[in-house]
Amino acid sequence: MKQIITACFLAFAFLFLIPSESYPQNPESRFLTLDQVISLAREQSPDAMAARHRYRGSYWRHRSYQAGYLPGLRFDATLPNLNRTIQAITLPDGSDVFVRRSLASSSGNLSLNQRVGFTGGQIFMSTGLERIDLIREDGNQVSYLSTPINIGFTQPIFAFNPYRWERRIEPLRFQEARKRYIEDLETISLRANNLFFDLLLAQINIEINTLNLANNDTLYEISKGRFSLGRIAENELLQMELNVLNSEAALEQARIDYEAALFRFRSYLAIESVENITLVLPEERHKLIIQLEEALVQARQNRSDILALERQQLEAESAVSQARSESRFNANLFAVYGLTQTAESFSDVYADPLDQQQLRVGIQIPILDWGVGRGRVRMAESNRELVNTNVEQALIDFEQEVFLKVMEFNMLERQLMIAAKADTIADKRYEVSRQRYLIGRIDILELNIALEEKDRAKQRYLSALRNYWRGFYEMRRLTLYDFKDDGPITLNFSEI
């Protein structure tokens, strides 16, 4: 009966000395869930800003490409050009003399150009006016030259047409940039998830070690009383004192780890350091089973890597076409028709204009280049084969990555359930061991083993929870598909 009364007294003292809250919360703390952390990261993290600027650069590149196929209106002017020099003049008899000249010239030209992407040529239309003022001592002499209209075109024949390839490559490049931006955001979500669980783990480690310190300190006080009564040996008392010291050291290390994780967390999310952060443990589980065939289909349709591989093949084909074109016969056609007139007064310069024509055909025939052209073609063809080989291997690696990630993700739910159940069992076992230690049924060694198993089970559960959410966001990044809402991941690009 005396032993029972003593055990009840010790149990009451143990429970009374345990603090009601293991890790008191600051009333001014900012509570953040995983979804809120990811939303902040996608909006204001350095990676998010860099991704936005990369996309904007791609957007304006695409706009410039589109604008290149629209008519371009340009005005060129010289107002004025003053020239006072001594120049050589050829006389009618063929001799040259040096004459001092003083003149001022002005000109203006308005031109409209249109690129013809299908043929690789260009058509243009222009109008212009020139004025020359000869400065003399007996008075200035003025003359005008007008070009009311000029219409012409330039067209390469048998030459490489960069516009035809550009019209195939640039839209693909822009679609690739859009998908890459979505991938960048999903990568940011994945990193924010890792930082969230880094800080959450550090936060929970403080809670665990604070509670362990309180428990060990309480057990140490109880052990001193039991030692004074001769109920335990000195070795057990010393072990309990060592447990207290180890708990204090573990708590200090947990606080250091927490501050380091908090600094990385705040830095990445651009959160003011004056705020106290408290993370909320995510409880939602999606219970998803992803089919491999569906994941592969979505990954092929949505990932920028597939478009990048297709673009690389087109660029390699374009290089081969250019090398072949530059190594053979080429010709250029240039033709202009227009009206012109000259007069000494502005009112007469547009009267009765005269027609003017110009036709020029230039040819380029490689006769002897010592195999330079053929070598360039062979290098381009070799590079094309290399690109095709790399593309085939990249597709195999891509599908293999999807396969492994899907298999891994489908096992994470089961692993999380096992870890949660193990955590619950370890907590119960420690509580039973603690009660048995209080009544003297087990020694301190068994209690320490139960405590270590409890802490390890908690760590394994948090690790499994972290892996589950990391796998969830990895599948989103890998396929650009939201399996929870059953739809592709899209963005409103007009708001970027």
Image: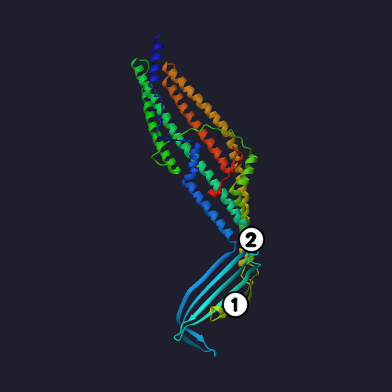
Q: On the rendered image, what quadrant is the N terminus found in?
A: top left
- Residue sitting at x 55%, y 54%: 59
Left or right, 126 with respect to 206, comes to right
Dot 1 crowding, Cα within 10 Å, few <14, some 14–19, many 20+: many
Compare residues 391 and 49 and report the one nearer the observer: 49
Q: Is residue 5 above or below residue 280?
A: above
Query: Residue 335: x percent and y percent?
Result: 64, 73
Is any part of residue 375 visible from this angle? no
Amino acid type, callout 2: Arg
Secondary structure of the residue carrying numbered label 1: strand
Instruction: Please state which of residues 60 and 340 is positioned toward the viewer in this rendering.
Output: 340
Q: Which mark is residue 340?
A: 1
Real-space Cα separation, disc 2 to disc 1, in angstroms: 36 Å
Task: Say which quarter of the image contains residue 151.
Answer: bottom right
CB-based contact (under 8 Å), mark 2 and mark 1: no
Which residue in the structure is indicated by mark 2? 164
Residue type (three-letter) at the residue carrying disc 1: Thr
From the viewer's perspective, tell me whether residue 242 is left or right of residue 377.
left
Observer-nearest of 345 and 17: 345
Q: In percent of the image, x 40 and y 24: which residue is there?
A: 20
| Residue 54, above or below 276 | below
Give left or right: position of 199 versus 110.
Answer: left
Which one is closest to the eye, mark 2 or mark 1? Answer: 1
Looking at the rendered structure, the secondary structure element under dot 2 is helix
- Image position of 382 with respect to 235: above or below: below
Q: Position of residue 130 (x, y in %)?
A: 53, 76
Q: Can residue 207 be seen by looking at this rendering?
A: yes
* Residue 27 - label: none
Q: How is the image coloured?
A: rainbow
Earlier residue among tags 2 and 1: 2
